[in-house]
Amino acid sequence: MAVATIDVAPLSGAFGNRTLGAEIHGLDLTRPLDAATEQALRDAWTEHLVLVIRDQRDLSVEDQRRFCRIFGALGDRTRPKETRQEGSDAPEGVMYVSNLKKDGKFIGSLPDGEMHFHIDQCYTASPATGTCLYAIEIPPEGGDTLFTNLYTAWERLPPDLRNELASRKAMHYFDYGTTRNTGISDEQRATLPHYAHPVGRVHPLSHRTALYVCRLMTDHIDGLSERDSRNVLDVLFDAVENPDYRYTHKWRVGDLLLWDNRCTAHARTDFDPNQRRHLRRFTIQGEQPV
């Protein structure tokens, strides 16, 4: 059992003390942590939304799984088995975000390209509370992950718009393998995974409200006409993607990141597909948004 005193260093701020992201120093995650350190990590996650722990070289699947369980029960993959690329030999609950190939086929998901801002599993009844991503191989440039503070996005909306949206829900869809929103057809609406959640989602620990929409997956706002819904969503997407609310993570091998899907959205920048990029992902089981 490792007894650690962690150092929490905020990475970015938006509008005074509204921070997004903190780098955690003083941890060796190849060993179990004591209860006080685990609680300090939970507190830091609630405050900073994204935790960055660098230099965790040779972190095993079990090490990463143990770390994730500090924050809750592990989630399962939501991708249908017939579309999963990891194969039957992948450890339970693991998703590889990877452009590596075996026998001519990608061994992971989302192998390359830019990705619009999105919230993991928002198209399900109980989206993942958190996502944990560990860098095994990283290209020399590109493939950055952008995070945005959905608390700030909500709080900076005009008050009359917040009031209008306070009782509204937004419908989210996901087309597996899609990294850019090209619109949802009527035929897709009948078959794709989808779920409606409050536009303003209240975090169960911080009790703050987050703007729970994203360009990649949010299709419309219930109760509004198609035209009104699109006009409002254009405003909300711009708010979510405001550069002032962001933290940009430039990956290094050995980085471990944990982000809170209840109050952040994330995106990926493009990179050279000929450069190797291989990361290991777990999710933390979620609850029904309110």
Image (cartoon, rainbow, N blue to C red):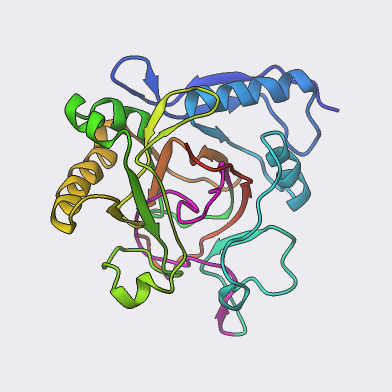
Quarter assignment of residue 189: bottom left
Name the spot of residue 50 as percent of width and height, x first: 50, 33
Relative image position of residue 221 (x, y in whole percent): 28, 50
Is residue 217 highlighted in magenta? Answer: no
Q: Residue lying furthest front in this view?
A: 223
From what the image shows, is residue 68 above or below residue 221? above
Q: Is residue 231 left or right of residue 95?
A: left
Residue drawn at point x = 19 percent, y = 32 percent? 161
> Depth check: 220 or 285 in front?
220
Q: Position of residue 126 (x, y in %)?
A: 55, 48
Q: Please, is residue 107 above or below residue 203 in the view?
A: below
Q: Is residue 131 magenta?
A: yes
Bounds of the magenta segment = 104-132
Q: Position of residue 54 (x, y in %)?
A: 58, 36
Q: Is residue 62 left or right of residue 244?
A: right
* Residue at horizontal 72 percent and vertical 21 percent from the top: 37
Q: Nearer the viewer, residue 115 or 126?
A: 126
Left or right: 3 as drawn, with respect to 76: right
Residue nearer the viewer, 261 or 103:
261
Q: Quadrant of the N terminus?
A: top right
**Which residue occupies 74% across, 60% down?**
92
Asked if 167 appears above or below 226 in the picture, the reply is above
